[in-house]
Image (cartoon, rainbow, N blue to C red):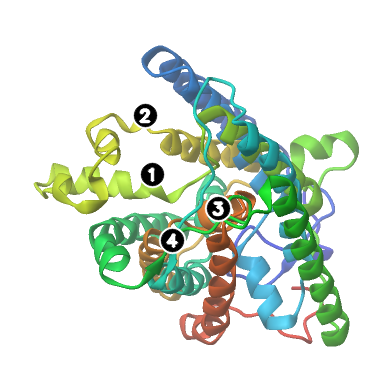
């Protein structure tokens, strides 16, 4: 039984804080068993039909999804809270996550460390009009769609119905973006990729120190802003107590930040690239378009090495496997907390999800990734484009604060008790 006594941040980022009990609902044991069974079947299939790397990536994806859900680790809500009421708690968790990530990524990239002999490379992408426009519209899209790329996946795992709409149009948007990408990257101004480690003479050691200084400065600024604006605190989450908290949430954001950084480093060492999400969406959408007769193979996006992915099974795609793992991991985590439940779709959040999904999908392709591939993976890889992505996405978030109410979506206010 659940008694309602104090506010909590809900799974949905489109709702105001609601009331909750200090205790979670009973575990949804049949759903947990189902999630584990599906994961096991998929693991066995990947182990038999694909390379040894794929089942390992599935496990990493499961752990990523489990971590994201238990902490409700958000990028969308972090940017929204900062821009609306000045609360920087979640953004400081981002800085901790990035600090741990660069500490792990530096030796991995410097010495080419990997588990399966894969060549190792970070996400270092060009800086140009494509990045600036793409990150800005992604920032708008994630505030309307109710979640970023990782947020979309883990919210689906938690049963948030409207996010299926966001995902569908996310896929459509990123497929269109893949078709248009040569225009944005070849016909419009763009500079060469810039790595703080290899383009500046700093080396990975120097770039690591500079990165930590940047993260510390950003964290300090958020503390100053919070004190000046007297920001409302982040609402607490329902949670079990003691050791049970590991399995039935909620996790502190700082714990999730460390876990996500470690899992991203393990992903880098497993497949030779950091964690990514949206390239799989482009693959899924392109394969569907190809099925209906569209000459996808002629697109500039699918030339060279990328053509292999288009011709192969989606289960051979490492990002697809990670995405499936994230959804399943979040599903198991939500069921463990007794929280899996399909939610209501309204006219407002339906249209917001359509527009938000399209903007995120298109923006992700233009910006060489999303909040995970460009922001998290880019900064962890010492790429300048990751920092610019974050700045432009925050700019898009600011604009979206004025658009959300048009769809009936809430925006935190300075006089709220929690945000």
Q: CA distance from mark 2 to mark 1?
A: 10 Å
In contact (CB < 8 Å): disc 1 and disc 4: no
Q: Which residue is mark 1?
A: 280
- The first of marks 1 and 4 along the sequence is 4
Q: CA distance from mark 2 to mark 4?
A: 33 Å
- The first of marks 1 and 3 along the sequence is 1
In contact (CB < 8 Å): disc 2 and disc 1: no
The residue lying at 45 percent from left, 33 percent from top is 321
Q: Is residue 310 above or below residue 116?
A: below
Of 306 and 286, nearer the camera is: 306
The residue lying at 25 percent from left, 70 percent from top is 187
- The first of marks 2 and 1 along the sequence is 1
Say few, some or many: other residues with alpha carbon within 10 Å of mark 1 (under 14 / 14 to 19 / 20 or more). many
Residue 12 spot, x, y in % from top left? 60, 62
The residue lying at 80 percent from left, 52 percent from top is 254
Q: CA distance from mark 1 to mark 3?
A: 13 Å
Residue 3 spot, x, y in % from top left? 81, 57
Residue 4 spot, x, y in % from top left? 80, 61
Q: CA distance from mark 4 to mark 3?
A: 21 Å
Of 111 and 338, nearer the camera is: 111
In contact (CB < 8 Å): disc 4 and disc 3: no
Of 356 and 368, nearer the camera is: 368
Q: Which residue is mark 2?
A: 315
Position of the C terminus, as image quadrant, is: bottom right
Q: Secondary structure at mark 2?
A: helix
Q: Is residue 39 above or below residue 44?
A: below
Q: Which residue is mark 3?
A: 372
Q: Which mark is residue 192?
A: 4
Q: Secondary structure at mark 4?
A: loop
Q: CA distance from mark 1 to mark 4?
A: 25 Å
């Amino acid at each position: 039984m659940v008694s309602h006594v104090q506010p909590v941040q809900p799974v949905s980022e489109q709702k105001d804080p609601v009331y909750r009990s200090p205790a979670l609902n009973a575990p949804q044991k049949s759903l947990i068993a189902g999630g584990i069974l599906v994961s096991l079947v998929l693991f066995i299939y990947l182990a038999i039909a694909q390379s040894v790397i794929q089942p390992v990536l599935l496990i990493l994806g499961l752990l990523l999804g489990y971590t994201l859900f238990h902490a409700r680790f958000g990028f969308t809500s972090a940017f929204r809270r900062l821009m609306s009421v000045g609360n920087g708690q979640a953004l400081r968790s981002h800085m901790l996550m990035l600090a741990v990530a660069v500490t792990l990524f530096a030796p991995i990239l410097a010495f080419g460390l990997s588990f399966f002999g894969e060549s190792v490379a970070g996400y270092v992408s060009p800086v140009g009009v494509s990045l600036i426009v793409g990150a800005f519209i992604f920032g708008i899209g994630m505030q309307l769609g109710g979640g970023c790329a990782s947020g979309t996946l883990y919210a689906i795992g938690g049963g948030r119905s409207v996010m299926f709409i966001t995902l569908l149009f996310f896929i459509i948007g990123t497929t269109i973006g893949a078709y248009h990408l040569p225009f944005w990257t070849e016909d419009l101004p763009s500079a060469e990729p810039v790595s703080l480690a290899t383009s500046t003479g700093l080396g990975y050691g120097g770039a690591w120190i500079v990165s930590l200084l940047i993260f510390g400065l950003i964290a300090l600024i958020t503390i100053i802003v919070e004190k000046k604006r007297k920001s409302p605190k982040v609402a607490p989450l329902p949670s079990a107590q003691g050791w049970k908290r590991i399995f039935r949430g909620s996790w502190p954001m700082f714990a999730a930040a460390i876990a996500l950084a470690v899992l991203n480093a393990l992903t880098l060492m497993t497949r030779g690239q950091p964690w990514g999400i949206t390239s799989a969406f482009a693959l899924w959408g392109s394969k569907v378009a190809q099925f209906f007769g569209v000459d996808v193979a002629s697109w500039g996006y699918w030339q060279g090495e990328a053509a292999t992915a288009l011709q192969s099974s989606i289960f051979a795609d490492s990002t697809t496997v990670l995405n499936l793992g994230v959804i399943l991991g979040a599903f198991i985590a939500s069921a463990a907390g007794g929280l899996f439940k399909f939610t209501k779709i309204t006219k407002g959040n339906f249209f917001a999800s359509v527009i938000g999904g399209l903007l995120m999908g298109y923006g992700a392709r233009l910006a060489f990734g999303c909040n995970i591939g460009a922001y998290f993976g880019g900064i962890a890889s010492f790429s300048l484009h990751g920092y610019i992505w974050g700045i432009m996405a925050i700019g898009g978030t600011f604009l979206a604060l004025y658009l959300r109410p048009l769809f009936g979506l809430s925006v935190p206010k300075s006089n709220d008790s929690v945000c």
